[in-house]
Image (spheres, rainbow, N blue to C red):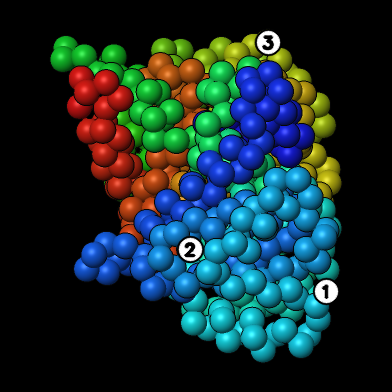
Amino acid sequence: MRVVSVEQMRQIEERAIHQYGIPSLLLMENAAWAVVDEIRRCLPKDEEGDLNGRKAVILVGKGNNGGDGLAVARLLVFQGMDVTVFLFAQPQEFKGDAALNLRLFQGTTGKCFEIKGEKQRRLTRFALAQADVVVDALFGIGMRGALPSLIEEYVSEVNRAPGWVISIDIPSGVEANTGKVYRTAICAQTTVSFGLPKWGLFLGEGPDYCGRVVVDPISIPNSYLQDEGISTFVLTDDDVRALLPVRKLKGHKGTHGKGILVAGSKGMSGAAVLAGQGALRSGIGLLQIVTPHGIAQDVDARITEATVWSASGEDSLNEEAWSVILKQAEKAQALAVGPGLAQNLRFISVLDEILKTISCPVVLDADALNLVALEAGLLTSRNGRGPLILTPHPGEMARLCQCSVDDVENNRLDLAVAKAVEWEAVVVLKGSVTIIASPDGRAFFNPTGNPGLGTGGTGDVLTGSILAWLAQGVPPLEAACLGVYLHGKSADSLASEYGWSGFTALEVADYLPKVRRGLELKPLDGKRG
Protein backbone atom coordinates (compact mmCIF):
# COMPACT_ATOMS: atom_id res chain seq x y z
CA MET A 1 0.00 0.00 0.00
CA ARG A 2 1.29 3.46 -0.86
CA VAL A 3 2.02 5.99 1.90
CA VAL A 4 1.91 9.72 1.19
CA SER A 5 2.99 13.10 2.41
CA VAL A 6 0.43 15.80 3.19
CA GLU A 7 1.19 17.49 -0.12
CA GLN A 8 0.73 14.29 -2.12
CA MET A 9 -2.61 13.53 -0.42
CA ARG A 10 -3.90 17.00 -1.11
CA GLN A 11 -2.97 16.68 -4.76
CA ILE A 12 -4.83 13.35 -4.96
CA GLU A 13 -7.93 14.88 -3.36
CA GLU A 14 -7.80 17.89 -5.66
CA ARG A 15 -7.61 15.64 -8.70
CA ALA A 16 -10.52 13.55 -7.43
CA ILE A 17 -12.64 16.68 -6.92
CA HIS A 18 -11.74 18.65 -10.05
CA GLN A 19 -10.86 15.97 -12.60
CA TYR A 20 -13.10 13.10 -11.52
CA GLY A 21 -15.92 15.34 -10.35
CA ILE A 22 -16.38 13.97 -6.82
CA PRO A 23 -17.94 16.71 -4.65
CA SER A 24 -15.80 17.57 -1.63
CA LEU A 25 -18.92 17.26 0.56
CA LEU A 26 -19.30 13.65 -0.59
CA LEU A 27 -15.67 12.92 0.36
CA MET A 28 -16.40 14.34 3.81
CA GLU A 29 -19.57 12.23 4.14
CA ASN A 30 -17.70 9.09 3.05
CA ALA A 31 -14.97 9.86 5.58
CA ALA A 32 -17.62 10.18 8.30
CA TRP A 33 -19.18 6.84 7.42
CA ALA A 34 -15.74 5.20 7.58
CA VAL A 35 -15.34 6.49 11.15
CA VAL A 36 -18.86 5.38 12.10
CA ASP A 37 -18.16 1.90 10.73
CA GLU A 38 -15.03 1.71 12.87
CA ILE A 39 -16.95 2.88 15.94
CA ARG A 40 -19.45 0.10 15.36
CA ARG A 41 -16.56 -2.37 15.16
CA CYS A 42 -14.79 -1.11 18.28
CA LEU A 43 -17.69 -0.80 20.69
CA PRO A 44 -19.10 -4.00 22.20
CA LYS A 45 -22.61 -4.59 20.87
CA ASP A 46 -25.75 -5.01 22.94
CA GLU A 47 -28.23 -7.81 22.36
CA GLU A 48 -29.73 -5.98 19.38
CA GLY A 49 -26.28 -5.32 17.96
CA ASP A 50 -26.75 -1.55 17.63
CA LEU A 51 -25.38 1.63 19.22
CA ASN A 52 -28.64 2.88 20.68
CA GLY A 53 -28.15 4.74 23.95
CA ARG A 54 -24.34 4.71 23.84
CA LYS A 55 -22.57 8.00 24.57
CA ALA A 56 -20.15 9.74 22.19
CA VAL A 57 -18.05 12.87 22.64
CA ILE A 58 -16.72 14.61 19.53
CA LEU A 59 -13.95 17.23 19.84
CA VAL A 60 -14.15 19.54 16.84
CA GLY A 61 -11.75 22.07 15.35
CA LYS A 62 -12.64 24.62 12.69
CA GLY A 63 -11.05 22.97 9.63
CA ASN A 64 -12.08 20.12 7.37
CA ASN A 65 -11.05 17.64 10.06
CA GLY A 66 -13.65 19.30 12.28
CA GLY A 67 -16.15 19.06 9.42
CA ASP A 68 -15.51 15.32 9.29
CA GLY A 69 -16.14 15.16 13.03
CA LEU A 70 -19.42 17.06 12.76
CA ALA A 71 -20.58 14.68 10.02
CA VAL A 72 -19.66 11.75 12.29
CA ALA A 73 -21.62 13.35 15.12
CA ARG A 74 -24.76 13.69 12.96
CA LEU A 75 -24.53 10.10 11.73
CA LEU A 76 -24.07 8.81 15.29
CA VAL A 77 -27.21 10.65 16.38
CA PHE A 78 -29.07 8.82 13.62
CA GLN A 79 -27.57 5.58 14.99
CA GLY A 80 -29.32 6.31 18.30
CA MET A 81 -26.27 7.45 20.24
CA ASP A 82 -26.24 10.23 22.83
CA VAL A 83 -23.82 12.66 21.14
CA THR A 84 -22.07 15.68 22.65
CA VAL A 85 -19.96 17.97 20.47
CA PHE A 86 -17.40 20.39 21.87
CA LEU A 87 -16.43 23.17 19.45
CA PHE A 88 -12.92 24.55 19.80
CA ALA A 89 -13.74 27.49 17.55
CA GLN A 90 -16.53 30.00 17.21
CA PRO A 91 -19.35 28.93 14.87
CA GLN A 92 -18.64 31.80 12.46
CA GLU A 93 -15.08 30.45 11.98
CA PHE A 94 -16.36 27.29 10.25
CA LYS A 95 -16.28 27.60 6.47
CA GLY A 96 -17.50 25.64 3.46
CA ASP A 97 -18.31 21.97 4.00
CA ALA A 98 -17.42 22.21 7.70
CA ALA A 99 -19.92 25.08 8.19
CA LEU A 100 -22.64 23.11 6.41
CA ASN A 101 -22.03 20.06 8.60
CA LEU A 102 -22.19 22.26 11.70
CA ARG A 103 -25.62 23.54 10.66
CA LEU A 104 -26.79 19.99 9.86
CA PHE A 105 -25.68 18.74 13.27
CA GLN A 106 -27.35 21.67 15.03
CA GLY A 107 -30.60 20.46 13.47
CA THR A 108 -30.35 17.12 15.29
CA THR A 109 -30.99 16.18 18.91
CA GLY A 110 -27.26 16.17 19.64
CA LYS A 111 -25.76 18.58 22.18
CA CYS A 112 -23.22 21.22 21.14
CA PHE A 113 -21.03 23.37 23.38
CA GLU A 114 -18.49 26.01 22.45
CA ILE A 115 -15.21 25.86 24.36
CA LYS A 116 -14.28 29.39 25.40
CA GLY A 117 -11.75 28.74 28.13
CA GLU A 118 -11.07 26.90 31.34
CA LYS A 119 -14.67 27.17 32.60
CA GLN A 120 -15.78 24.42 30.20
CA ARG A 121 -13.21 21.95 31.57
CA ARG A 122 -15.52 20.56 34.22
CA LEU A 123 -18.33 19.93 31.74
CA THR A 124 -15.92 18.29 29.30
CA ARG A 125 -14.36 16.13 31.99
CA PHE A 126 -17.78 14.92 33.07
CA ALA A 127 -18.81 14.10 29.48
CA LEU A 128 -15.54 12.28 28.77
CA ALA A 129 -15.89 10.20 31.94
CA GLN A 130 -19.24 8.87 30.68
CA ALA A 131 -18.39 8.49 26.99
CA ASP A 132 -18.21 5.09 25.34
CA VAL A 133 -16.29 6.62 22.44
CA VAL A 134 -14.33 9.85 21.98
CA VAL A 135 -13.71 11.16 18.45
CA ASP A 136 -10.71 13.43 17.91
CA ALA A 137 -11.55 15.88 15.09
CA LEU A 138 -9.46 18.80 16.37
CA PHE A 139 -6.66 19.10 13.84
CA GLY A 140 -6.06 17.37 10.53
CA ILE A 141 -3.00 16.56 8.47
CA GLY A 142 -2.12 20.23 7.94
CA MET A 143 -1.15 20.89 11.54
CA ARG A 144 2.43 21.93 12.31
CA GLY A 145 4.13 22.53 15.64
CA ALA A 146 2.76 22.23 19.15
CA LEU A 147 -0.90 22.24 20.08
CA PRO A 148 -2.29 25.51 21.51
CA SER A 149 -1.91 25.54 25.29
CA LEU A 150 -5.68 25.64 25.93
CA ILE A 151 -6.25 22.57 23.76
CA GLU A 152 -3.36 20.74 25.43
CA GLU A 153 -5.31 20.77 28.69
CA TYR A 154 -8.28 19.13 27.02
CA VAL A 155 -6.04 16.60 25.25
CA SER A 156 -4.76 15.51 28.66
CA GLU A 157 -8.38 14.94 29.72
CA VAL A 158 -9.03 12.84 26.60
CA ASN A 159 -5.96 10.71 27.24
CA ARG A 160 -7.28 9.93 30.73
CA ALA A 161 -10.81 9.15 29.52
CA PRO A 162 -12.00 5.52 29.81
CA GLY A 163 -13.80 5.44 26.44
CA TRP A 164 -12.45 4.25 23.10
CA VAL A 165 -10.52 7.09 21.41
CA ILE A 166 -10.66 7.38 17.62
CA SER A 167 -8.67 10.00 15.71
CA ILE A 168 -9.73 11.25 12.30
CA ASP A 169 -6.90 10.95 9.73
CA ILE A 170 -4.12 11.49 12.31
CA PRO A 171 -4.07 12.08 16.07
CA SER A 172 -4.16 15.79 16.88
CA GLY A 173 -0.69 16.92 17.93
CA VAL A 174 1.15 14.51 15.60
CA GLU A 175 2.70 16.10 12.51
CA ALA A 176 1.46 14.20 9.47
CA ASN A 177 4.73 14.36 7.54
CA THR A 178 7.20 13.67 10.33
CA GLY A 179 5.34 11.98 13.19
CA LYS A 180 6.83 14.60 15.50
CA VAL A 181 5.04 15.40 18.77
CA TYR A 182 6.19 18.63 20.38
CA ARG A 183 4.63 18.41 23.83
CA THR A 184 1.55 16.23 23.80
CA ALA A 185 -0.95 14.66 21.42
CA ILE A 186 -4.13 12.64 21.42
CA CYS A 187 -3.28 9.02 22.25
CA ALA A 188 -5.73 7.18 19.99
CA GLN A 189 -6.64 3.52 20.10
CA THR A 190 -7.71 3.70 16.47
CA THR A 191 -6.84 6.15 13.70
CA VAL A 192 -9.01 6.19 10.58
CA SER A 193 -6.91 7.57 7.72
CA PHE A 194 -8.51 8.62 4.44
CA GLY A 195 -7.36 7.90 0.89
CA LEU A 196 -3.89 6.69 1.80
CA PRO A 197 -1.99 6.56 5.12
CA LYS A 198 0.33 9.47 5.88
CA TRP A 199 4.05 9.32 6.63
CA GLY A 200 3.58 10.52 10.19
CA LEU A 201 1.70 7.38 11.15
CA PHE A 202 4.97 5.46 10.70
CA LEU A 203 7.64 8.02 11.54
CA GLY A 204 8.86 9.66 14.72
CA GLU A 205 6.47 9.29 17.63
CA GLY A 206 3.47 8.71 15.36
CA PRO A 207 3.28 4.94 15.97
CA ASP A 208 3.08 5.57 19.74
CA TYR A 209 -0.06 7.70 19.34
CA CYS A 210 -2.04 6.32 16.39
CA GLY A 211 -3.01 2.87 17.71
CA ARG A 212 -4.58 0.60 15.10
CA VAL A 213 -4.56 2.28 11.69
CA VAL A 214 -7.56 1.82 9.40
CA VAL A 215 -7.37 3.16 5.85
CA ASP A 216 -10.52 3.96 3.86
CA PRO A 217 -10.37 5.17 0.21
CA ILE A 218 -13.55 7.32 0.73
CA SER A 219 -14.45 6.75 -2.97
CA ILE A 220 -11.28 8.31 -4.39
CA PRO A 221 -10.61 6.42 -7.67
CA ASN A 222 -8.04 3.66 -7.32
CA SER A 223 -6.11 5.03 -10.32
CA TYR A 224 -5.33 8.15 -8.30
CA LEU A 225 -4.30 6.13 -5.24
CA GLN A 226 -1.98 4.04 -7.43
CA ASP A 227 -0.14 7.11 -8.74
CA GLU A 228 3.30 5.96 -9.91
CA GLY A 229 4.81 9.19 -8.59
CA ILE A 230 4.33 7.89 -5.03
CA SER A 231 7.46 6.03 -3.98
CA THR A 232 6.77 5.24 -0.32
CA PHE A 233 4.85 2.14 0.74
CA VAL A 234 3.74 0.21 3.82
CA LEU A 235 4.10 -3.56 3.63
CA THR A 236 0.98 -5.70 3.95
CA ASP A 237 0.27 -9.42 4.21
CA ASP A 238 -0.73 -9.46 0.54
CA ASP A 239 2.50 -7.75 -0.55
CA VAL A 240 4.71 -10.15 1.39
CA ARG A 241 2.73 -13.25 0.46
CA ALA A 242 3.35 -12.47 -3.20
CA LEU A 243 7.12 -12.44 -2.54
CA LEU A 244 7.34 -15.90 -0.98
CA PRO A 245 9.18 -18.36 -3.26
CA VAL A 246 7.18 -21.44 -4.22
CA ARG A 247 9.04 -24.70 -3.73
CA LYS A 248 8.85 -27.45 -6.30
CA LEU A 249 8.09 -31.06 -5.43
CA LYS A 250 11.51 -32.15 -6.68
CA GLY A 251 13.37 -29.45 -4.75
CA HIS A 252 16.34 -30.38 -2.57
CA LYS A 253 19.00 -28.70 -0.45
CA GLY A 254 20.94 -27.69 -3.53
CA THR A 255 18.00 -25.95 -5.17
CA HIS A 256 17.01 -24.24 -1.91
CA GLY A 257 20.19 -22.21 -1.90
CA LYS A 258 23.59 -22.06 -0.25
CA GLY A 259 24.47 -19.17 2.02
CA ILE A 260 27.68 -18.20 3.79
CA LEU A 261 27.52 -16.62 7.25
CA VAL A 262 30.67 -14.92 8.54
CA ALA A 263 30.07 -14.35 12.22
CA GLY A 264 31.14 -14.80 15.83
CA SER A 265 34.01 -13.99 18.14
CA LYS A 266 35.07 -14.96 21.64
CA GLY A 267 32.11 -14.36 23.94
CA MET A 268 29.80 -13.84 20.95
CA SER A 269 29.34 -17.35 19.59
CA GLY A 270 25.61 -16.98 20.28
CA ALA A 271 25.32 -14.33 17.56
CA ALA A 272 26.54 -16.80 14.94
CA VAL A 273 24.17 -19.46 16.25
CA LEU A 274 21.14 -17.14 16.27
CA ALA A 275 21.86 -15.83 12.78
CA GLY A 276 22.24 -19.42 11.65
CA GLN A 277 18.90 -20.36 13.20
CA GLY A 278 17.29 -17.40 11.48
CA ALA A 279 18.59 -18.70 8.16
CA LEU A 280 17.55 -22.29 8.77
CA ARG A 281 14.10 -21.32 9.97
CA SER A 282 13.69 -19.23 6.83
CA GLY A 283 14.27 -22.25 4.61
CA ILE A 284 17.88 -22.07 3.44
CA GLY A 285 19.10 -25.31 1.82
CA LEU A 286 22.77 -25.23 2.85
CA LEU A 287 24.24 -23.00 5.53
CA GLN A 288 28.01 -22.58 5.86
CA ILE A 289 29.34 -20.66 8.86
CA VAL A 290 32.83 -19.16 8.88
CA THR A 291 33.89 -18.37 12.43
CA PRO A 292 37.13 -18.01 14.47
CA HIS A 293 39.04 -21.12 15.43
CA GLY A 294 38.56 -20.45 19.14
CA ILE A 295 34.75 -20.78 19.01
CA ALA A 296 34.25 -23.05 15.98
CA GLN A 297 33.72 -26.17 18.06
CA ASP A 298 31.14 -24.44 20.25
CA VAL A 299 29.22 -23.09 17.22
CA ASP A 300 29.36 -26.51 15.54
CA ALA A 301 27.88 -28.18 18.62
CA ARG A 302 25.06 -25.65 18.98
CA ILE A 303 23.88 -25.52 15.37
CA THR A 304 24.24 -29.05 14.04
CA GLU A 305 22.37 -28.43 10.77
CA ALA A 306 25.06 -26.05 9.48
CA THR A 307 28.58 -26.74 8.25
CA VAL A 308 31.09 -24.80 10.34
CA TRP A 309 34.46 -23.73 8.92
CA SER A 310 37.21 -22.65 11.26
CA ALA A 311 39.24 -19.65 10.12
CA SER A 312 42.44 -18.18 11.49
CA GLY A 313 42.10 -16.11 14.60
CA GLU A 314 41.64 -17.53 18.07
CA ASP A 315 39.29 -14.84 19.39
CA SER A 316 38.14 -12.99 16.27
CA LEU A 317 38.52 -13.22 12.52
CA ASN A 318 41.46 -11.46 10.88
CA GLU A 319 42.87 -11.03 7.36
CA GLU A 320 43.69 -14.73 7.13
CA ALA A 321 39.97 -15.52 7.03
CA TRP A 322 39.70 -14.26 3.44
CA SER A 323 40.95 -17.46 1.82
CA VAL A 324 38.36 -19.55 3.71
CA ILE A 325 35.53 -17.13 2.86
CA LEU A 326 36.51 -16.97 -0.81
CA LYS A 327 36.64 -20.75 -1.14
CA GLN A 328 33.25 -21.31 0.52
CA ALA A 329 31.61 -18.47 -1.43
CA GLU A 330 32.49 -19.93 -4.84
CA LYS A 331 29.13 -21.69 -5.24
CA ALA A 332 27.10 -19.65 -2.78
CA GLN A 333 24.00 -17.63 -3.68
CA ALA A 334 24.43 -15.14 -0.80
CA LEU A 335 26.82 -14.07 1.93
CA ALA A 336 26.20 -12.28 5.25
CA VAL A 337 28.89 -10.73 7.45
CA GLY A 338 28.78 -9.20 10.89
CA PRO A 339 26.80 -10.85 13.73
CA GLY A 340 29.07 -11.03 16.80
CA LEU A 341 32.09 -10.39 14.59
CA ALA A 342 33.99 -8.02 16.94
CA GLN A 343 35.84 -4.98 15.66
CA ASN A 344 39.22 -6.46 14.76
CA LEU A 345 40.81 -3.83 12.56
CA ARG A 346 42.71 -6.54 10.73
CA PHE A 347 39.41 -7.72 9.29
CA ILE A 348 38.82 -4.46 7.38
CA SER A 349 40.94 -5.71 4.49
CA VAL A 350 38.70 -8.81 4.29
CA LEU A 351 35.61 -6.60 4.08
CA ASP A 352 37.24 -4.70 1.24
CA GLU A 353 37.94 -7.95 -0.61
CA ILE A 354 34.38 -9.17 -0.05
CA LEU A 355 32.87 -5.96 -1.37
CA LYS A 356 34.99 -5.78 -4.50
CA THR A 357 35.28 -9.51 -5.26
CA ILE A 358 32.15 -11.43 -4.22
CA SER A 359 29.49 -11.09 -6.93
CA CYS A 360 26.56 -12.74 -5.11
CA PRO A 361 24.39 -10.58 -2.81
CA VAL A 362 26.17 -9.48 0.37
CA VAL A 363 24.54 -8.51 3.68
CA LEU A 364 26.51 -6.35 6.14
CA ASP A 365 25.31 -6.18 9.74
CA ALA A 366 26.50 -5.28 13.23
CA ASP A 367 30.29 -5.11 13.59
CA ALA A 368 30.78 -5.35 9.83
CA LEU A 369 29.00 -1.99 9.65
CA ASN A 370 31.05 -0.58 12.51
CA LEU A 371 34.25 -1.57 10.72
CA VAL A 372 32.99 -0.03 7.47
CA ALA A 373 32.30 3.20 9.39
CA LEU A 374 36.00 3.34 10.35
CA GLU A 375 37.14 3.23 6.73
CA ALA A 376 35.76 6.14 4.74
CA GLY A 377 34.91 5.20 1.20
CA LEU A 378 34.99 1.44 1.77
CA LEU A 379 31.44 1.03 0.44
CA THR A 380 32.53 2.43 -2.93
CA SER A 381 34.42 -0.85 -3.42
CA ARG A 382 31.05 -2.48 -3.97
CA ASN A 383 29.62 -0.16 -6.59
CA GLY A 384 28.74 -2.23 -9.62
CA ARG A 385 30.18 -5.46 -8.19
CA GLY A 386 26.93 -6.99 -6.97
CA PRO A 387 23.89 -6.44 -4.75
CA LEU A 388 24.47 -5.10 -1.23
CA ILE A 389 22.17 -4.93 1.82
CA LEU A 390 23.03 -2.95 4.95
CA THR A 391 21.05 -3.54 8.17
CA PRO A 392 22.00 -0.78 10.65
CA HIS A 393 20.23 0.16 13.85
CA PRO A 394 20.18 3.95 14.54
CA GLY A 395 23.55 3.91 16.33
CA GLU A 396 25.27 2.07 13.48
CA MET A 397 23.59 4.35 10.95
CA ALA A 398 24.88 7.37 12.85
CA ARG A 399 28.42 6.01 12.70
CA LEU A 400 28.12 5.25 8.99
CA CYS A 401 26.79 8.74 8.27
CA GLN A 402 29.08 10.51 10.78
CA CYS A 403 26.16 12.19 12.51
CA SER A 404 24.31 11.87 15.82
CA VAL A 405 21.68 9.29 16.66
CA ASP A 406 19.20 12.15 17.06
CA ASP A 407 19.98 13.25 13.50
CA VAL A 408 19.14 9.74 12.32
CA GLU A 409 15.94 9.46 14.35
CA ASN A 410 14.70 12.90 13.29
CA ASN A 411 15.31 12.22 9.60
CA ARG A 412 14.79 8.47 9.20
CA LEU A 413 12.98 8.35 5.87
CA ASP A 414 15.00 10.94 3.97
CA LEU A 415 18.31 9.66 5.33
CA ALA A 416 17.57 6.00 4.57
CA VAL A 417 16.56 6.81 0.99
CA ALA A 418 19.45 9.21 0.39
CA LYS A 419 22.03 6.71 1.61
CA ALA A 420 20.48 3.82 -0.29
CA VAL A 421 20.87 5.85 -3.47
CA GLU A 422 24.38 7.05 -2.56
CA TRP A 423 25.66 3.62 -1.51
CA GLU A 424 23.78 1.76 -4.27
CA ALA A 425 22.52 -0.57 -1.57
CA VAL A 426 19.31 -1.68 0.07
CA VAL A 427 19.32 -0.01 3.49
CA VAL A 428 17.33 -1.64 6.30
CA LEU A 429 17.16 1.09 8.94
CA LYS A 430 15.91 -0.75 12.00
CA GLY A 431 13.62 0.79 14.58
CA SER A 432 10.10 0.69 15.99
CA VAL A 433 8.99 1.00 12.36
CA THR A 434 11.84 -0.35 10.24
CA ILE A 435 12.39 1.36 6.89
CA ILE A 436 13.64 -0.62 3.90
CA ALA A 437 15.08 1.82 1.33
CA SER A 438 16.01 0.90 -2.24
CA PRO A 439 18.73 2.35 -4.49
CA ASP A 440 15.97 3.39 -6.92
CA GLY A 441 14.49 5.79 -4.35
CA ARG A 442 11.60 3.67 -3.11
CA ALA A 443 11.05 3.08 0.60
CA PHE A 444 8.93 0.60 2.53
CA PHE A 445 7.61 0.96 6.09
CA ASN A 446 7.33 -2.27 8.04
CA PRO A 447 4.25 -2.30 10.32
CA THR A 448 5.07 -5.57 12.13
CA GLY A 449 7.09 -6.01 15.30
CA ASN A 450 6.89 -4.76 18.89
CA PRO A 451 9.15 -3.77 21.81
CA GLY A 452 9.74 -7.44 22.57
CA LEU A 453 12.32 -7.35 19.77
CA GLY A 454 14.40 -5.06 21.96
CA THR A 455 16.46 -7.92 23.34
CA GLY A 456 19.85 -9.32 22.47
CA GLY A 457 20.14 -11.50 19.38
CA THR A 458 16.99 -10.55 17.49
CA GLY A 459 19.00 -8.53 14.97
CA ASP A 460 21.19 -11.58 14.34
CA VAL A 461 18.08 -13.64 13.58
CA LEU A 462 16.99 -10.99 11.05
CA THR A 463 20.36 -11.09 9.29
CA GLY A 464 20.17 -14.86 8.96
CA SER A 465 16.63 -14.67 7.64
CA ILE A 466 17.54 -12.15 4.93
CA LEU A 467 20.54 -14.35 4.01
CA ALA A 468 18.18 -17.31 3.55
CA TRP A 469 15.75 -15.48 1.28
CA LEU A 470 18.64 -14.25 -0.86
CA ALA A 471 20.02 -17.78 -1.11
CA GLN A 472 16.60 -18.99 -2.28
CA GLY A 473 16.72 -16.59 -5.21
CA VAL A 474 14.59 -13.73 -3.87
CA PRO A 475 15.90 -10.37 -5.22
CA PRO A 476 17.67 -8.16 -2.64
CA LEU A 477 14.94 -5.57 -2.02
CA GLU A 478 12.26 -8.22 -1.78
CA ALA A 479 14.47 -10.42 0.43
CA ALA A 480 14.95 -7.53 2.85
CA CYS A 481 11.19 -6.85 2.93
CA LEU A 482 10.44 -10.55 3.48
CA GLY A 483 12.98 -10.87 6.26
CA VAL A 484 11.91 -7.74 8.12
CA TYR A 485 8.16 -8.34 7.81
CA LEU A 486 8.21 -12.00 8.88
CA HIS A 487 10.70 -11.24 11.68
CA GLY A 488 8.31 -8.63 13.08
CA LYS A 489 5.28 -10.85 12.56
CA SER A 490 7.01 -13.64 14.46
CA ALA A 491 7.51 -11.26 17.39
CA ASP A 492 3.86 -10.19 17.15
CA SER A 493 2.75 -13.82 17.41
CA LEU A 494 4.91 -14.27 20.49
CA ALA A 495 3.58 -11.04 21.99
CA SER A 496 0.03 -12.34 21.64
CA GLU A 497 1.03 -15.14 24.05
CA TYR A 498 3.56 -13.43 26.34
CA GLY A 499 3.12 -9.68 25.95
CA TRP A 500 5.93 -7.33 24.99
CA SER A 501 8.69 -8.88 27.06
CA GLY A 502 10.14 -12.20 28.06
CA PHE A 503 10.41 -14.01 24.75
CA THR A 504 13.84 -14.63 23.28
CA ALA A 505 15.63 -14.22 19.97
CA LEU A 506 15.70 -17.99 19.51
CA GLU A 507 11.94 -18.10 19.92
CA VAL A 508 11.60 -15.39 17.27
CA ALA A 509 13.58 -17.62 14.92
CA ASP A 510 11.48 -20.66 15.81
CA TYR A 511 8.25 -18.84 14.96
CA LEU A 512 9.43 -17.78 11.47
CA PRO A 513 8.12 -20.86 9.62
CA LYS A 514 4.82 -20.60 11.47
CA VAL A 515 4.11 -17.03 10.38
CA ARG A 516 5.29 -17.78 6.84
CA ARG A 517 2.91 -20.72 6.70
CA GLY A 518 0.15 -18.51 8.04
CA LEU A 519 0.56 -16.25 5.02
CA GLU A 520 0.68 -19.20 2.62
CA LEU A 521 -2.64 -20.50 3.96
CA LYS A 522 -4.33 -17.19 3.07
CA PRO A 523 -3.65 -17.15 -0.70
CA LEU A 524 -4.52 -14.26 -2.96
CA ASP A 525 -6.09 -16.44 -5.64
CA GLY A 526 -7.21 -19.45 -3.60
CA LYS A 527 -4.73 -21.75 -5.34
CA ARG A 528 -1.62 -21.62 -3.15
CA GLY A 529 -1.19 -23.25 0.24
Q: Residue at x 60, y 13 (%)?
A: 386
Looking at the picture, which amino acid does disc 1 mark? Ser
Q: Residue at x 30, y 35 (%)?
A: 519
Kindly state the secondary structure of the residue where label 1 is placed.
Answer: helix
Q: Examine the rendered structure and indicate whether residue 399 appears above or below residue 253.
A: below
Q: Which residue is mark 2?
A: 77
Mark 1 neighbour density, 10 Å: few (under 14) some (14–19) many (20 or more) = few
Tell me the quarter of the picture where residue 154 sits. bottom right
Looking at the picture, which amino acid does disc 2 mark? Val
Which of the labelled discs sits on residue 384, or is there none? 3
Counting residues from the start of the chain, the first of labels 3 and 1 encountered is 1
Residue 438, visible in the rendered structure: no
Which of the labelled discs sits on residue 369, or is there none? none
- Callout 3–callout 2 Cβ contact below 8 Å: no
Residue 28, visible in the rendered structure: yes
Kindly state the secondary structure of the residue where label 3 is placed.
Answer: loop
Q: Examine the rendered structure and indicate whether residue 204 appears above or below residue 425.
A: below
In which quadrant will I find the C terminus?
A: top left
Q: Nearer the viewer, mark 3 or mark 1?
A: 1
Tell me the quarter of the picture where residue 40 sits. bottom left
Q: Which residue is mark 1?
A: 149
Is 74 displayed left or right of 79 in the figure? right
Counting residues from the start of the chain, the first of labels 3 and 2 encountered is 2
